[in-house]
Amino acid sequence: MKTIQEARTLLQRLPQQSLGFYPTPLHRLERLSRQLGVELYLKRDDLSGVNLFGGNKIRKLEYLLGDAVDRGCGAAITYGATQSNHAMQTAAACRRCGLAPILYLVSVVEPDPRQLRANLLLDSVLGAEVHIVPMAPGETEAAAEARAFRMGADHAARLEAQGTGCCDIPMGGANPLGSVGFIGGWVELREQLEALGVAADWVCHATGTGGTLAGLAAGRALLGDDTRILPVSVSAKDTGYEARTARLANEALALLGAEERVEAEALAVARDYYAPGYEIPNEAGNGAVRLLARTEGILLDPVYSGKAFGGMVDQIRRGRIPQGSTVVFWHTGGATALFAEGEIVGDLAQREEG
Ligand SMILES: *Cc1c(COP(=O)(O)O)cnc(C)c1O
């Protein structure tokens, strides 16, 4: 178990690029706290920078691109859906470091090439080299992603052969180095809570690839905190998800030379809130987007943060998160999805009756 100062010293061992504005704000939601009967705080990684459309991937990219720059890379390749927040944030971060961004994007939702929207539009403005990987009829997302990874790896090998160092970043930036960014995030949150004289009972966030969760859980273990983490999944997860995420957390701790460990049992992921699927909106998620917008004026998104916020509210209403608890919702960003294709936005794009 480390002190905050010891943790900071470990985090400084790895090369890092400064890509955002940290610490991101932490603030209380007065009206919603009263309404829900808990002390609710928001950790604003949606405001991380590097531009107006930041999000949780920037913390990971500070280490991922820190390493890429250190190794003298000239380009970075990454992966995601066509509306991937991670891909867009990677493109922006690459530009800031002088690397060429190359994206392999699976069209989970078919984009209109004459009318690019949301993140795909930003990828284009940022001048990223975009390769759309269409989903074949009947093909699963996982199969199309596997195809994209192979295409990207081939591309990286070609660039390396031509003498351009290329950093191959996994989907979501979910590798041990990326997760180190969220160990830093956890340490940052602890410092902010201490300054407020508050201890968090729960930290809740949306989990996709698991890189964020791995880092948060690793940070929690590193500081020996008993705060509980409620990860809300935004896509189908197999039963091995917690074990893989714990391994990722432990590999991130090992990169810091820390001996603390994360157990898979500590990572119970809530799987009840993503249906019918990734990038397909549901009533509770869109309801949560409206709830936060209408009580606090803050925007979530239908793909990630809305579903997670809805899950957290449900757990509070059911008493699984007891009344009076101090709860931090980690806002991971993603609000560009509000301007994405109609399939992604769902009924948020429709005028309400009455
Ligand atoms: C990527 C993303 C997540 C999930 O983070 P992982 O590290 O992939 O689990 C959550 N929210 C938003 C808005 C994201 O873009």
Image (tube, rainbow, N blue to C red):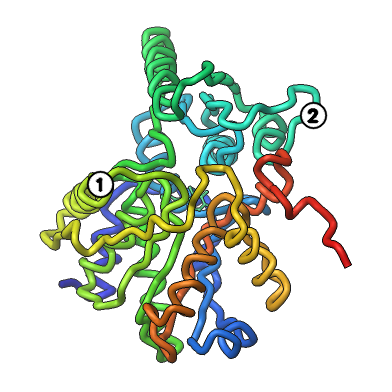
What label sits on residue 115 in the rendered view?
2
Residue 58 visible in the displayed image: no
Q: Which residue is mark 1?
A: 239
Residue at image position (43%, 78%) is 318
| Residue 247 image offset from top left, x and y in percent | 19, 48
Compared to residue 224, the image places residue 241 above or below, namely above
- Residue 321's image quarter? bottom left
Compared to residue 342, the image places residue 281 above or below, namely below
Q: Is mark 2 within 8 Å of ligand 1?
A: no
Left or right position of 140 against 21: left
| Residue 135 image offset from top left, x and y in percent | 53, 21
Q: Could you tell me the amino acid type at mark 1?
A: Thr
Of 347 and 78, the residue lying toward us: 347
Q: Residue furthest left?
A: 259
Residue at image position (49%, 61%) is 308
Tag 1 secondary structure: loop
| Residue 172 image offset from top left, x and y in percent | 43, 41
Tag 2 secondary structure: loop
Left or right position of 74 against 34: left
Q: Within 10 Å of the Cα at label 2, are there few (<14), some (14-19), or many (20+) other Cα atoms?
A: few
Q: Could you tell me the amino acid type at mark 2?
A: Gln
Q: Residue furthest right?
A: 354
- Give the position of the C terminus as an image quadrant: bottom right
Q: Is mark 1 within 8 Å of ligand 1?
A: no
